[in-house]
Amino acid sequence: MHSATLDAATLEAFITAAVAAPSIFNTQPWRYRLEPETVSLQVWAATERGLRHTDPTGRALHISVGASVFNLRVAVHHFGWSPVTRLLPRPEDPGLLATVRLAAPFSRLTAGHRSDLYEAITRRHSSRLPFSGKPLPPHVQTELVEAAHGEGALLTFPAYSEADRLLRLTMEAEHRNRSEPDRGAESRRWIHPDLYESTDLGLPQSALGPQDAHERLAMRDFTAQRHAERLPAQPFESKPVIALLTTEHDRRADWLRAGQALEHVLLVATAHGLRASLLHQPMEWPDLRRSLSRAPAQMLIRLGYGPAGPATPRRAAHEPSDTGLPDQQGS
């Protein structure tokens, strides 16, 4: 394959899809760079957008980047190439988290995902609004489990009593977060009353959902109870559907795989008309994270049918590079 066949419009479509992935606090902690010699996209960690108090090990950063890598893979396949992905390809460059090379497609290769996931990318975003409480059909749950398994992770749907225990742990984590000034200040940095006034973007206030939802469902209080205005209370579903994403090991490569699994699950859910929100709070406290499951827990996902909620903003697809190559950044 020759690099000239990758035109600017296609490259922009790749990056636009990649940066539509979810990221913790909408920090968008990634940077993309084209390597023309190998027709590859390098994915670098934007460590300046890391969270020192919430994510000191960088685990959530890696999961965010992994989700972005999955979107890139979907886009590459959609445009007719086979994405050849390598995680942590250079041990001497720890900031280089992945490379995705555009290889010529072969009939014996399959995408490994549904054909409609590319269209789901622009429709997927977190909803922190109440869901209807309608149960998920068994075949949908099965497909979500298979999506995670295909990326090297395990997705389980705990029974109601176990889901209730997981939500109580999430509530405990939220109480701890709200009582720590450093964490509160860090989260408030990424919340903006008007998303158009933000340079970092982060999360607009309108995307947070009902601000006193803690009474019914443990949703993150990003502003640590310092709300410019409070949204009206709304009843949440009495038996929320909670899915737990785990991995066999807990290394950097596992975190990247977990991010790809998470986004695969979210896109399949979107294709089925489901909404989702991520409950990351107990992952931020080592003792609570260990209490979630025997295997390393990577994310709690709330799923259901309901309103979409407002979308969070994304950074521009193109920014200049000091090397002369296109250097794309976003979320």
Image (spheres, rainbow, N blue to C red):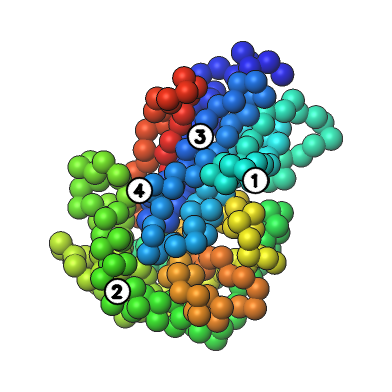
Q: Residue furthest front?
A: 92
Q: Position of residue 319 (x, y in %)?
A: 39, 28
The tag earlier along the polypeptide, 3 or 4, is: 3
How far is mark 1 from mark 4, CA to CA?
34 Å
102, above or below 125, in the image: above
Reading the image, the residue beneath label 2 is: 180
Q: Position of residue 127 (x, y in %)?
A: 40, 58
Q: Secondary structure at mark 1?
A: loop
Badge nearest the viewer, 2 or 4: 2
Instruction: Classify 10 Å Cα crowding around label 1: few (below 14), some (14-19), many (20 and above).
Output: few
Q: Are the two marked residues, 1 and 4, in contact with CB atoms closer than 8 angstroms?
A: no
The tag earlier along the polypeptide, 2 or 4, is: 2
Image quadrant where residue 79 sits? top right
The tag earlier along the polypeptide, 1 or 4, is: 1
Q: Are the two marked residues, 2 and 1, in contact with CB atoms closer than 8 angstroms?
A: no
Q: Are the two marked residues, 3 and 4, in contact with CB atoms closer than 8 angstroms?
A: no
Instruction: Classify 10 Å Cα crowding around label 2: few (below 14), some (14-19), many (20 and above).
Output: few
Q: Amino acid at mark 4?
A: Thr
- Which residue is pictured at 82% across the width and 31% down the height? 107
Badge nearest the viewer, 1 or 3: 1
Reading the image, the residue beneath label 3 is: 32
Reading the image, the residue beneath label 1 is: 91
- Which residue is pictured at 60% across the width and 53% down the height? 256
Q: Secondary structure at mark 2?
A: loop
Badge nearest the viewer, 1 or 4: 1
Reading the image, the residue beneath label 4 is: 312
Pick the front one: 130 or 257: 257
